[in-house]
Amino acid sequence: MREGTERADAIVVGAGLAGLAATAELAEAGKRVLLVDQEPEQSLGGQAHWSLGGLFLVDSPEQRRMGVRDSAELALQDWMGTAGFDRPEDAWPRKWAEAYVDFASGEKYAWLKKMGMSFFPVVGWAERGGHLAGGHGNSVPRFHITWGTGPGVVAPFERRVRAAADRGLVDFRFRHRVDEMVIEDGTATGVRGTVLAPSDIERGQASNRDTAGEFELSAQAVVVTSGGIGGNIDLVRSNWPERLGEPPEHMLSGVPEHVDGRMLGIAEKNGAQIINRDRMWHYTEGITNWDPIWKRHGIRILPGPSSLWLDATGRRLPAPNFPGFDTLSTLEHIMGSGHEYTWFVLSQKIIEKEFGLSGSEQNPDITGKDLKLVLQRVLPGAPGPVEAFKQHGVDFAVADRLPALIRKMQEIAGDGALDADTVTREVVARDREMANDFTKDLQVMSIHNARSYRGDRLGRVAAPHQILDPKAGPLIAVRLHLLTRKTLGGLHTDLDARVLRSDGSPLPGVYAAGEAAGFGGGGVHGYRALEGTFLGGCMFSGRTAGRAAAAAIG
């Protein structure tokens, strides 16, 4: 340790949601914490700020009020069928999954409510699966949107940390980029790095990397909560799973550029094991942001089940690759199609009821807790942010008749791949299946099934109708891109969030949580996510790491 090195009980690297949760627990245990982040203070809360605030809860009061019967047993069945754990190194991730489902069906709701969080009354149904009972997907709606979206998730943890700072237990070290973990006699004793020049950029924008000095910090515990790799497209490509073939040439980014994976490499260099690098969660319904905040900024459409999903040539995607059903299966199909983009074809009636956009900034009514504005969602017309994309987005085409719509789609794509006859055949065939309340078409079956849930019938799923019905028009097409988002693998940890070495032994003094740890264990989701589980995984693993580190500190 250098003379004059600042000391604390613990260092938390990364001031996102997991870092805030860990810091809060450490401080409330009476430990002094240095919270370090390479970004400026206005980025406190990290990616969680930008989220829709969706949380996975099991057997909640909101579910019961909506007539949903859920249980820990059903949730665990869904989780295991979704994760598909099949590797020896999945032993700890599997235990984390069991612990997290127990948390989500137990104390999680009361814990969050005690901190002042509340939820939108209609529970969403994400990742519906489309397989058998033991396969992928949520058997019931479990997606609880936080009142206040992402900022509403961050706020109670930020309050706890700032209150601890007022008591002298937390010191913020923004614009401090960790470049090295200090290891003495095999034990982590601190971090070294570069002090970056101040930056007054807005949240999410790329900050400068100008250097203003160096630093060294010392502590008995280093907690890594630095996030994943989603903003580093080159790293995403290098970790791209072989099972999906060659990585895509074009991807939008769902996270800011500072989500760069640097700290993962630093931890690995110092003996930490990273597992499940090839497991990642990228969305297939990305659209180019017409008003971007960061480079390659994409927004995910949160679709209902009614849009017709076509590949670049106009062929319909096979079951169960319907909107909102199985993200990974859809990604695998797209990567094998020879093209990296797809299309939604739908009606105005569908977009008005079924299109949502992910992100706090795309949902100003819920983010701003504006009930009057929320109630406007039931009025005719698409929500304001959706309508803005329809008018300004480069991926949207609108026309009164199908031939004109197809010509606009061909102009947008510009590669000659879309065949007009194929599109016409697929749309007409689908529309014929709408003549009855019964059908052989699995997607049409799913529409009827969705409307048996009160929440979907009231506000999420349009009444079954023919896309070409003039009364439902105009017609709309949306080009969809691949959108990077989450790292499902990460630092291997035990149930105390202690980082493990390749031989399975703990790396003394090092803990990890959040996306850096694959949301727990090095990959609590396995291959797929049930959605609403990323924010909750940050909270749960951050809380676990903070409590475990506090208990270990002398």
Image (tube, helix red, strand yellow):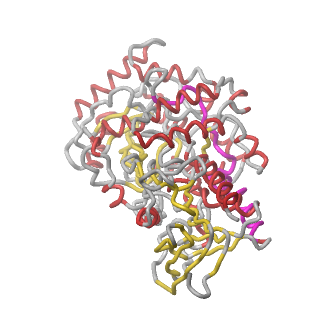
Question: Residue furthest toward the left?
Answer: 416
Q: Position of residue 490 (x, y in %)?
A: 46, 53
Indicate whether residue 359 is drawn in magenta.
no
- The correct choice, above or below, for 300 with respect to 18 in the image is above
Q: Position of residue 422 (x, y in %)?
A: 24, 30
Q: Is residue 87 found left or right of 201 in the rendered image?
A: left
- The correct choice, above or below, for 80 with respect to 355 in the image is above
- The correct choice, above or below, for 272 with respect to 429 in the image is below
Q: Residue at x 77, y 73 (%)?
A: 168
Q: Is residue 25 found left or right of 16 in the rendered image?
A: right
Indicate whether residue 152 is drawn in magenta.
yes
Q: Residue at x 54, y 79 (%)?
A: 199
Q: Is residue 261 found left or right of 48 in the rendered image?
A: left
Which quadrant of the figure has residue 441?
Answer: top left
Q: Residue at x 61, y 39 (%)?
A: 99
Q: How many marks?
A: 0
Quarter of the image with the C terminus is: bottom right
Which quadrant of the figure has residue 32?
Answer: bottom right
Nearer the observer, 432 or 86? 86
Q: Position of residue 70 (x, y in %)?
A: 64, 26
**What span is in magenta?**
136-165
Q: Position of residue 88 (x, y in %)?
A: 41, 40
Quarter of the image with the N terminus is: bottom right
Question: Residue furthest toward the front?
Answer: 185
